[in-house]
Image (cartoon, grey):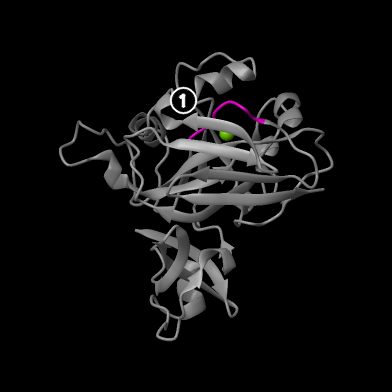
């Protein structure tokens, strides 16, 4: 299952995404996931009238962020090499923070660099999309509660960070939370294997800057789900950003950042003042 969210003829739509000889296409329209109530209001019901939809290349679609989460939970310092590059200790427990949903940005959308920051960094990350309500889960403890059953799929994110404000503010709300600081997409897929190490790469203006494997996570996905849901109920559509590998760095206006994982496509966003 792969799907995206996009605009066509002034309507918000969801489409199934197919790999056609190495190129992603939107093959047909699908119903919206349960959490997208705005979709039902816009369309007056659950299913778009779609008999005349013509398949189109994903690259030609006006993509939107593929999720409408109630919250975005982020994990800091989940790769030891990244913790070290910023001079931090490897954490003994997951380090959690939120990004506001107002920071969401579509694939291809422009990240606006706020004038109050002098150092804005990219952080390429694998993101999880929650598929059903998850509260105080204990994978392996309750029979049938397989942690994968809570995950609808995976996508890509850029945890854009005002690095200077992250230090001077004392907490991270503003540094991580500016409008446009959470590009997500281009689509959601459950067709990658999280048990295997997933290779994540980030390029700036085409130059490889991050090359990490989720095999190097300090805290695994089930450990993160147990830790997060012990405190916070996750709802369908909620996003979890799983942390960034080493190689983060500052950006200048005019730069373009591309985050990619095989099978998840490429999330590409320009940065401008
Ligand atoms: Mg991060």
Residue 21 visible, this orientation: yes
Residue 21 figure quarter: bottom left
Closer-to-camera residue (123/193):
193
When the figure is inspected, residue 9 is found, relative to residue 93, above or below; the finding is below
Q: Which residues are magenta?
A: 242-248
Residue lying farthest to the left in this orientation: 143
Q: Per the image, is 224 magenta?
A: no
Where is residue 15 drawn, in percent x and y? Answer: 44, 68
- Toward the bottom, the furthest residue is 52
Q: Does the magenta segment cover residue 246? A: yes
In the picture, measured across the screen, residue 151 lies left or right of residue 245, that is: left
Q: Quadrant of the N terminus?
A: bottom left
Residue 159: which quarter of the image?
A: top right
Q: Position of residue 70 (x, y in %)?
A: 49, 52
| Ligand 1: quadrant of the figure | top right
Q: Which residue is mark 1?
A: 94
Query: For this view, does 139 lie left or right of residue 205?
Result: left
Q: Please determine whether, in this image, residue 44 is positioned above or below residue 232.
A: below
Q: Residues within 10 Å of mark 1 (few under 14, many from 20)?
A: some
The residue at the point 50 percent across, 17 percent down is 91
What secondary structure characterizes most of the magenta part?
A: loop
Give the x, y percent position of residue 86: 64, 19
């Amino acid at each position: 299952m792969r799907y995206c969210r996009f605009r066509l003829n002034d309507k918000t739509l969801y489409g199934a995404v197919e790999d056609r000889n190495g190129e992603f296409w939107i093959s047909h329209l699908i119903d919206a996931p349960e959490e997208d109530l705005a979709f039902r209001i816009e369309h007056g019901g659950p299913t778009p009238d779609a008999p005349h939809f013509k398949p189109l290349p994903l690259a030609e679609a006006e993509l939107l962020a593929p999720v409408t989460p109630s919250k975005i939970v982020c994990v800091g310092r989940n790769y030891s090499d990244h913790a070290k590059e910023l001079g931090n200790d490897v954490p003994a427990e997951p380090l959690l923070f939120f990004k506001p949903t107002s920071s969401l940005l579509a694939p291809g959308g422009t990240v606006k660099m706020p004038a109050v920051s002098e150092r804005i960094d990219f952080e390429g990350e694998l993101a999880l999309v929650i598929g059903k309500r998850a509260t105080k889960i204990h994978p392996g403890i309750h029979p049938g509660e397989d942690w994968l059953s809570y995950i609808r799929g995976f996508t890509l994110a850029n945890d854009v960070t005002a690095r200077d404000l992250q230090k001077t503010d004392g907490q991270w709300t503003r540094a991580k939370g500016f409008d446009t600081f959470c590009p997500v997409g281009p689509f959601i897929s459950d067709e990658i294997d999280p048990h295997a190490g997933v290779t994540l790469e980030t390029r700036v203006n085409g130059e490889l800057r991050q090359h990490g494997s989720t095999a190097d996570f300090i805290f695994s996905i089930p450990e993160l789900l147990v830790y997060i849901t012990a405190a916070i109920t996750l709802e369908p559509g909620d996003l979890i950003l799983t942390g960034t590998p080493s190689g983060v760095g500052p950006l200048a206006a005019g730069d373009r950042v591309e985050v990619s994982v095989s099978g998840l496509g490429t999330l590409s966003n320009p940065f401008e003042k």
